[in-house]
Image (spheres, rainbow, N blue to C red):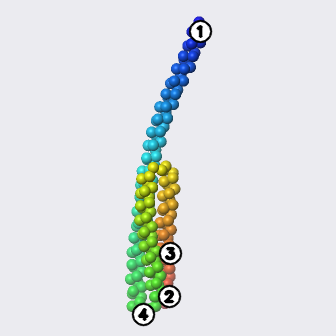
């Protein structure tokens, strides 16, 4: 009887180990599928989020261009009254250059972001790289806006 019990215990131990390994393999396969699904979902969300940000920044560049055109027409009207706005006109040329730089930075960032999104990197690394690209565009837009503010400040003495 002791011999049968001994063999039964060994059989149960081996049997339970076999099924625990098989269960671990099934769990690891299911975990891997879940991880890939979550990563794909994150990539989709990152793409949608940065698509919205790029649209907003594109709209900001367009607004800056329109504002530059309006400032140019104001400078022309002020020149007709024989006021000296040559410094404002020079600053406007600089501001237009910065607006063009912002538009170029935006298009470059869109291309780089598309490359990053199509790469096989983890969403965390993708997110960091994309944030860096957005920071560059954001700073270019701020610089263009500051240049337009300088133009407006330069126009005010010509009015007095």
For marks 3 and 1, the one nearer the N-term is 1
Check disc 4 and report the residue beneath it: 82
Q: Residue at x 49, y 31 (%)?
A: 25
User: Real-space Cα distance between discs 1 and 2?
Assistant: 108 Å
The label shown at residue 146 is 3
Where's the N terminus, which quadrant? top right
For marks 1 and 2, the one nearer the N-term is 1
For marks 3 and 4, the one nearer the N-term is 4
| Label 2 crowd bin: few (<14), some (14–19), many (20+), radius 10 Å | few
Kindly give the residue lying farthest to the bottom in the view shown: 82
Where disc 1 sits, the SS reads helix
Q: Residue at x 47, y 35 (%)?
A: 29
| Label 4 crowd bin: few (<14), some (14–19), many (20+), radius 10 Å | few
Q: Residue at x 43, y 47 (%)?
A: 40
Residue 56 visible in the current orientation: no
The label shown at residue 115 is none
User: Real-space Cα distance between discs 3 and 4?
Assistant: 27 Å
User: Real-space Cα distance between discs 3 and 2?
Assistant: 18 Å
Kindly give the residue lying farthest to the top in the view shown: 1
Residue 15 image point, x, y percent: 52, 20
User: Real-space Cα distance between discs 2 and 4?
Assistant: 13 Å
**Is 73 on the left-hand or right-hand side of 157?**
left
Circle nearer the viewer, 3 or 2: 3
Q: Cβ–Cβ below 8 Å for labels 2 and 4?
A: no
Residue 139 image point, x, y percent: 50, 68
Check disc 2 and report the residue beneath it: 157
């Amino acid at each position: 009887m002791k011999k049968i019990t001994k063999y039964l215990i060994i059989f149960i131990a081996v049997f339970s180990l076999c099924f625990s390994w098989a269960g671990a393999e099934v769990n690891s396969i299911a975990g891997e599928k879940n991880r890939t699904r979550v990563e794909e979902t994150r990539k989709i969300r990152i793409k949608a989020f940065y698509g919205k940000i790029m649209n907003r920044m594109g709209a900001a560049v367009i607004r800056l261009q329109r504002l530059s055109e309006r400032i140019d027409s104001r400078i022309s009207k002020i020149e007709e009254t024989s006021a000296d706005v040559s410094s404002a006109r020079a600053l406007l040329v600089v501001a237009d250059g910065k607006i063009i730089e912002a538009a170029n930075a935006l298009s470059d960032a869109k291309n780089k972001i598309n490359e990053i999104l199509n790469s096989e990197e983890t969403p965390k690394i993708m997110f960091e790289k994309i944030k860096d690209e957005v920071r560059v565009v954001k700073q270019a837009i701020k610089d263009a806006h500051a240049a337009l503010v300088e133009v407006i400040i330069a126009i005010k003495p010509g009015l007095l």
